[in-house]
Amino acid sequence: MSGKLFGILSCVLVTVSAVSAAPVVRVDLSQSGDVERGWIDWNTGVKLDNANTSRQFLNEADFDADFTIDFIKIDSRNRRAMDDSVPMHDLLEDAFKESNPFDMVIKGLAAGVYTFTGYHHDTNEDVVNDDGTINITVKDADGTRLAADHLQQSWGTKPAFVASSNFRFRSDGVHDVTITFGDNNDGIHNEAYLNGFELTIWVSREQASRPSPENGATDVLKDVVLSWQPGIYAPAANGHRVYLSDVFADVNDGAPAALKGVTSLPEHVPAGLAFGTTYYWRVDEANNVTAWNKGQIWLFTTEPLAYALPGSAITASASSWHNDAMAPGKTVDGSGLDAGDLHSANEQDMWLSGPNDANPWIQYEFDRTYSLHEMWVWNFNQTFESVVGFGLKDVVVEHSADGVNWVALAGNVQVPAAAGEPGAAHDIAIDLGGAVARYVRITAKSNWGGWNRYGLSEVRFFYVPMAARGPEPETGSGGISPVPLLIWRAGRAAASHNVFIGTDEQAVRAATQPVATVASPSFEAGPLALGTTYFWRVDEINQAQTPAVWEGQVWSFSTNAFLVVDDMESYNDEEGQGTRIYETWADGWNVAGNGAQVGYLTVPSVEKLLVHGGKQSMPLLYDNRTEPYSEATRTFATPQDWTQFGIKTLILYFRGDPTNTGGKLYVKVNGVKAAYAGDAGNVAKAEWTQWSIDLASLGTNLQNVTKLAIGLEGGGSGTILIDDVQLWP
């Protein structure tokens, strides 16, 4: 069986170009016809109108972030059937077109270098040069330039060539990228066409890639370990040169101050990172030709010293209030604040005490105890504040851990007067010095006008995170492995971590005896039961601190009801990574008697449109006309125990095709065959069929499963899709 010839040629081409496969978006600007296999249908997005059209791409390409593409000034769309023998005929049958220049605006694209490939074909016309040539202009982070000059568009239902454009552009992660298509009025009808496009993150395989943390990441731990995928030519010893600085130019220019050294491992541990700072870094990879391959510049921002406590975690009360529209809750609900944290002059966005309040105070209760860093205060700011002076002046600020025992801040605290104008910034930041508190109370001793009314616009509390946070898996998650690795972000002063876990939420909440004490913020739980909800809590411990224990919140997750053998989601077409589907599922390539081919010969090799679950399924092409069988086999690197967790049944899903002929489906476990007992005609049905196999009936050692094969025998040929191979109790 020789079906991998195309794949081998693709590998050669990729190796020569020294550019690695990378996340890619392929979009068919289809209007009413078939969508090119493996491509995204533009019409599944939100369309605006015939002049402008827009689509969001949400987690559709494994890009760093979701993004949006707008087409501006599109006039009309075109459709005519292509000859089916033409490659990508479904793509070329539709197009966006316009006699005047039109724009493709890409918004929200993460910082990086991208490759754009566009297709420019008019299937409606059979006249040579009917639509002439086009120019393509790009406006990106590097400025505006001509990306294609007088590109000849193609035409007809069976063209001699298909016109395509190919260029790179750079996004800074902030500004839009605009690609403009315009005809040059050198044809007959003179319209610019775009049938579809491919957008790829461009990475030279000689360069470092796949940074961790991801490019543009925020809230990164100060003690982060930087890592990356090394270039293909980097030697094992001293192959990586690292630059790091909070000054972009120093990293870009390779300034000595930014050079952090040369490493052998593809990782670097920075020293002395500051809170709330954006850092730029790059890794140059060594080679034996040009000495060093300069890397791309990445960036990340470290976690802040303190975090703002959301208003939803605060309950406000007061000695009195003027009316319900000016209740104490107005000071923590964000009312009156704009996106820049500037406050309005509308009195109904504020708290005002009631009349004749002899001892005015306002108090805040938090959802739990915090280490408080500071409190921002926006004083009362209604329009006539400069006349009436209701804003607080001299105040006593107290805090308490239990609401009974109170500690006042030392010294006199005076809140500056607000100007009574919209767009007011906070008037003062009061240092709370790390007070361990669940309550804060502000008692007014005077105001700025002498009237017997007292008011505030807004307060905001900042805390230093001392308790465990950021659980992985996220609380409430489902479908979790029964042998999970639980991870969290440690409290700032934690020396060790007490872990509690169980199926009874109240028992975990009340527990005092941990199931484990660990030194690092992770815990290998399990084996756990399938299909069960678990609750867990982490207390942060430091006997040298007061308090010595910061009790954590109770989180939850639910284990999967089954075990995943293969959901086909991990495969891609990257060369040299061992991640192509036929590198895991061995087929009939160079195997006498085996007529199987796993994966398509063109990229993507997996099926992207017809899936049972997730985003991919496995194509299994069989040809038993000259071979006795067609079989794909997965060999497990580590033998699997298919008896644990009460496993009894192997389930997989397959989908046939009406053009299939013959073919009797079977599965082998450790070489022991189980024939499909359902309707043999299901291999020709264009629908997903569940196949359940009683494992006990196989009579093989299920505690030591090393091979799983899926095949067809009995003549015929065709294609079936395989997805979601699972083990159920």
Image (spheres, rainbow, N blue to C red):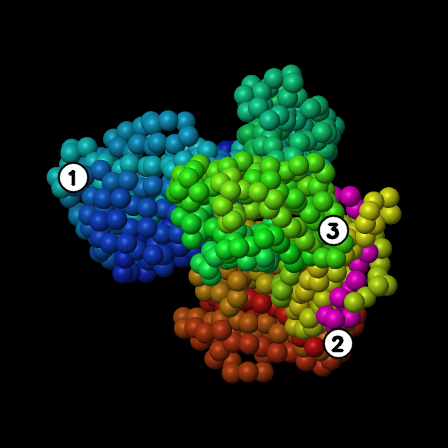
Q: Which residues are magenta?
A: 492-509
Left or right of 238: which side holds 51?
Answer: left
**Tag in front: 1 or 2:** 2
Mark 2 vs mark 3, CA separation in Å:
56 Å
Are circles 1 and 2 on residues that touch, CB within 8 Å? no
Pointer 1 local density, CA inside 10 Å: few below 14, some 14–19, many at least 20:
many
319 relative to 383 in the view: left or right:
right
In primary-sequence order, the first of circles 1 and 2 is 1
Residue 406 tag number: 3
- Type of the residue with mark 1: Asn
| Residue assigned mark 2 | 646
Q: Is residue 142 above or below residue 691?
A: above
How many numbered circles are shown?
A: 3
The amino acid marked with disc number 3 is Trp
Regarding residue 637, the answer to whether it shows in the image is: no
Amino acid type, callout 2: Gly
